[in-house]
Amino acid sequence: MAVTTGLVQQIIWTPSIGAACFYVGPSMASAEIFYIVVNSSASEAEIATNLNLLSLVVKAKGAGYPITVSHPDNSGQATGVSAGEFDISPIGQAIHNDFYSVSGSGIPADAVLQFETAASIVTVTPDLVRPHCVFVAELPPVIATGRNILRLSAAGWTSNSIPVDVSSGPRLVKRVLFSGQPKPDPYTILFVANPGIQTEPGALAADVVLTDRPGFHNAVGYCLTNLFAVTEDLLRQFDNQFRIVTVFDNTLPATVENTLAHEIPPNLMETLRNRLAPFCSRYDEVADMVFVMHGSTTHDRATAWYTSDDGAKPSVAYTFDGAARVHGRFPSVPGSAALPLDMNQTGLTPFHEFGHGASDFNNGRINDLYVDGSPGGFVVNKKFRALATDPVPANFANYDGTGFNSDPNRDGLGYPGTWKSYHPIQIDTTRPNLMDNYWFAFDDPQFCRFDQLIHSWLTDRIMAKLTR
Amino acid sequence: MEPLHPKVRQALKRAYPNLKDEDIDTSEELLDQRMHADPDTEREKIAELDRRRMELIQRTMPQYSQIVRQVQAEMNPPIRAKKQNYSVEIKSPDHKE
């Protein structure tokens, strides 16, 4: 038995012998001819098998995938056809100026995308590279439309080459940037271009973000690099398991159900958290965290709302200072943050707001450390002394059997004399906590990290949702 | 919520010489309390906290929003001026694949 591998160049149906003939090779000039018999003289089982083989040949020709044909040494009759596996996979259609992602494994950090046609090779530097995925915020329109051969390339490494069809538009309303775990309820992070804003006086106004698609792509690209490519590694631990989706639907009017953001005087924006789950469900998504991207330039200080876990669904038990607590596996209201397109992209705002949003109203809040605050609710990362003059206790908390120390010096920023609050010890004691005022970092805010307790607690909380 | 940039605080104190750090901190504390209240069940509390915070801002730093925007405009790098992320190689006519 011999095998021949190559592209399907041509398929010809030959009714006189009840067979499909097809040519396999790098070009028609050098192709070998094979055939699959599907005439009625064969048994029902043979006909069904051969129709399946033929179907694969037809699909491989349409997609441009190479096939391997098994056949006797002295005959062109195909007895088996298989399409090989590729080590990369494009996620969704390749469309000019739209998001574009390619998944794989072991992708080097310096990987680039190469789109090749007979006339040119366009090399695109992705906005984010992770071992499992590369991401481009806007696919350059210089890539030729029609059939391209795509590969990822890095120093000393090249992926398989795969055929992709590139189009000039239209860009998709909903785009899956990464599909996450192949299961019914993957942990889902959704970025939505906000259709409507409830103004300070209470009116509904169209959000200009829906007229600024490039700005939306730019901001989402920044958010992804902020969440997955800064020094803090919390989300990199399991980012190959997250489902990441964008929705940009410029057909939506600023009705009540489409209004996802609300102005807070004088310059803040909050999400309207109870509208998020119904909105997402219209796009067949159940989100754990929703980033509401808006275009306001007057109310552009970002805020977040905690998740509300679904108490009726399963959870993972833990103890905090001896008290029984739970990490909910499912949200009833997703965590959320309102982020402006014009946010300062040198900071950590998306990740900081994720820290709030991924925590929970009832099962543990992660609060800002740059205000003193006051006791109330179950706060994971802040406690209070009886008097501001009392020393900061050495031990901050016991989380599920592990002790976590306090930070005696508040990130090196020092506790103001009137403050009673204190915090867990950092991972990086030379820079502010990611939940503190990261703008005070002596070098680069994007080097800041969470404290040890938040890192451990949020890891477990996200894992509870990833393993549902 | 996004932390207040130190340059905003500096600009506010420059614009209002009588403004104290405590005034800004109190405004931030009121905002912090507001963002801990449940927006579904504590609407009155949120409205009261917003009213107190805005009264403080109007009294001590009435041009707050304008000053914040001015600082942001001076500080923010141009986010749209993205570096070209692609290169194109035109194949020569005798290019062999």
Image: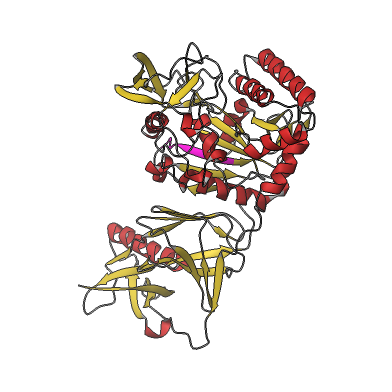
Q: Is residue A264 left or right of residue A334?
A: right
Residue A199: % across, % down: 76, 30
Which quadrant of the figure has residue A340? top right
Q: Is residue A118 left or right of residue A161?
A: right
Q: Is residue A166 magenta?
A: no
Coloured how?
A: secondary structure
Q: Nearer the viewer, residue A442 or A76?
A: A442
Q: Nearer the viewer, residue A126 or A167?
A: A126
Residue at the (75%, 27%) spot, across then down: B18
Q: Nearer the viewer, residue B8 or A42?
A: B8
Residue at the (64%, 48%) spot, across then down: A216
Q: How many marks?
A: 0
Magenta span of residues:
A184-191
Residue at the (33%, 63%) spot, across then down: A84
Residue A176: % across, % down: 52, 47
Residue A273: % across, % down: 60, 27
Up-down relation of residue A221 to residue B60 (above or below): below
Is residue A205 something one can see in this rendering?
no
Q: Quadrant of the C terminus of chain A?
A: top left
Up-down relation of residue A48 to residue B37 (above or below): below
The residue positioned farthest toward the bottom in the image shown: B94
Q: Nearer the viewer, residue A243 or A440?
A: A440
Q: Is residue A186 magenta?
A: yes
Residue A59: % across, % down: 43, 63
Which quadrant of the figure has residue A6? bottom left
Is residue B31 something one can see in this rendering?
yes
Residue at the (69%, 13%) spot, across then down: B44
